[in-house]
Image: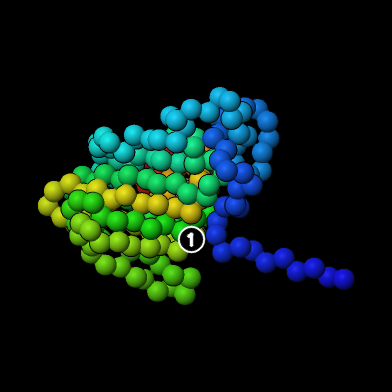
Amino acid sequence: MILFFTSPCYSDPDQLQGFCVADLKSTTTSLNGFPCKPVSKVTSSGFFFSGFTKEGNTDNMFGLGVSFGNVLSFPGLNTLGISMNRADFAPGGINPLHSYPRATEAGVIIKGKLLVGFRSTTNVFYSKVLKAGEMFVIPKGLVHFQKNVGRGKAVTITSFNSQLHGAAQLPATLFASNPAIPDDILAKNFQVDETVITSIKSKFGSS
């Protein structure tokens, strides 16, 4: 007899208990999130998070400050298959090209005006300028970005169907990896001289 198993449509597996507040200090190996704290040691604080109350630091090369509300900062999310981020944008700030390998992203603009765009697997580019109160969705794994195109600061709250969605930021992935991707490989991929690659890497401190 042959058994066929199909992948579920959600990202993280369903939990097998009412809750499982993460024990982030445990050394026990777990495949579905982190090991659970004993119920006797769980308090109300495990289910509440105030990490989005302050503006993120946008004093960086991208003008972007991200506050993470995932299982690492909010242990009560463990095994629940959800997480959220707050992203603050300085004027002209950008969340550079990136992808999430383990989650679909849905977001709502809280303040300002953002250009949101992504590329499909058939090489089609979808984009729109969104203002406060409008929402977007980015299918799992697709390369996308957000850019502040308004005059002032911008804020968005995003949610993910994973407690720890992972992120692959293309500029850092390509030009600041450790160990570094060889210059000749990048030069061949982008059809440029290796000196161009060296120059780009120097901006990320990896030349």
The residue furthest right is 1
Q: Secondary structure at mark 1?
A: loop
Query: Is 112 in front, or is 4?
Result: 4
Give the residue drawn at x 55%, y 34%.
22
| Residue 124 % position (x, y) | 40, 74
* Relative horizontal placement of residue 163, taking residue 30 as reference (left or right): left
**The image quarter in which residue 204 lies:** top left
Asked if 56 appears above or below 154 in the picture, the reply is above
* Relative horizontal placement of residue 57, taking residue 121 as reference (left or right): left
Give the residue drawn at x 38%, y 55%.
97
Answer yes or no: is residue 187 visible. no
Query: Is 155 in front, or is 100?
Result: 155
Give the residue drawn at x 49%, y 37%.
76
| Residue 111 % position (x, y) | 20, 51
Query: Is 38 in front, or is 180?
Result: 38
| Residue 32 % position (x, y) | 63, 44
Give the residue drawn at x 38%, y 58%.
106
Figure quadrant of the N terminus: bottom right
| Residue 184 % position (x, y) | 51, 52
The residue furthest left is 151
Figure quadrant of the C terminus: top left
Query: Is 136 in front, or is 20?
Result: 20
Answer yes or no: is residue 13 visible. yes
Q: Which residue is mark 1?
A: 140
> Mark 1 packing: few (<14 Cα in 10 Å), some, or many (20+)?
some
Rendered image coloring scheme: rainbow
Give the amino acid at mark 1: Lys
